[in-house]
Amino acid sequence: MPVGRAGRIAGGVIVAIAVALALAQLVLPGIAADRIGSRVGRYGSVQSVSVRSWPAVKLLWGDADSVKVRARDLSLSARQAASLVWEGRDAGRIDMTAAHVRLGQLRLSGVSLRKRGGALSAHATASAADVGAALPPGVYVSLLRSEGGHVEVRASGGLFGVSASLVAVAGAREGRLVARPLGLLLGGFELTLFSDPHVYVDGSARALATLPVKRRATGCR
């Protein structure tokens, strides 16, 4: 094969590759954004999704440089939330915000989630009314204090017709979110509030108010 012809073929291959990469850079981020929007949209209303990746062909393997998601109202379980976070494990940066999120029975406001590499941070607020609505009927909770990443509350109410009152502390422990009552009789008892093999909880919580929270018992006449 003449050298000139081989050079033209090599040049044509290089041009074709460059064109393919340019098209991928234009098309693939939009496709990825649509897929993410559809996935998150199963749980509510999504306002916008943007994806950045260089080169964009990394998206074929689920690897993105950054993902931004804005949502209005979402409703999902803690397990479903952990699953969404796990699906974004290969993204270098994730910034997600939502006006309201119903996580199980608890309604949260001003929710934001941030991922940088393998580190996650999330922030949200829950009003006294929202906490009360998530409690079983007849259960009363009052905040005692919050410090060092733990929240201490007094819970009282009826369970199986028996009234009881105890002080409990909620916080992170060995990668889980747990609550444990204080006192000699129940000091060794521990209730796991959230645990997932893909998420290691190492966060903090604080209270913005000290108002008591109550869920009134209701019945039918």
Image (tube, rainbow, N blue to C red):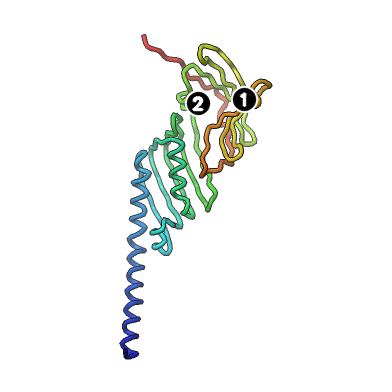
- The image quarter containing residue 212 is top right
Q: Earlier in the sequence, mark 1 or mark 2?
A: 2
Q: Nearer the viewer, mark 1 or mark 2?
A: 1
**Helix or strand or loop: what does disc 1 sit on?**
strand
Say few, some or many: other residues with alpha carbon within 10 Å of mark 2 (under 14 / 14 to 19 / 20 or more): some
Residue shown at 40% from the left, 13% from the top: 219
Determine contact: label 1, label 2, CB under 8 Å: no
Image x and y of residue 199, in percent = 52, 43
Query: Quick one: which residue is furthest to the top in this view?
Result: 221
- The residue that mark 1 highlights is 181
Q: Amino acid at mark 1?
A: Pro
Q: Disc 2 designates what residue?
A: 128
**Image quarter in which the N terminus is found:** bottom left
How many residues crowd around disc 1 within 10 Å: few (fewer than 14), some, or many (20 or more)? Answer: many
Q: Quadrant of the C terminus?
A: top left
User: Taking 146 as reference, is 166 above or below it?
Assistant: above
Residue 150 at x, y = what percent?
61, 33
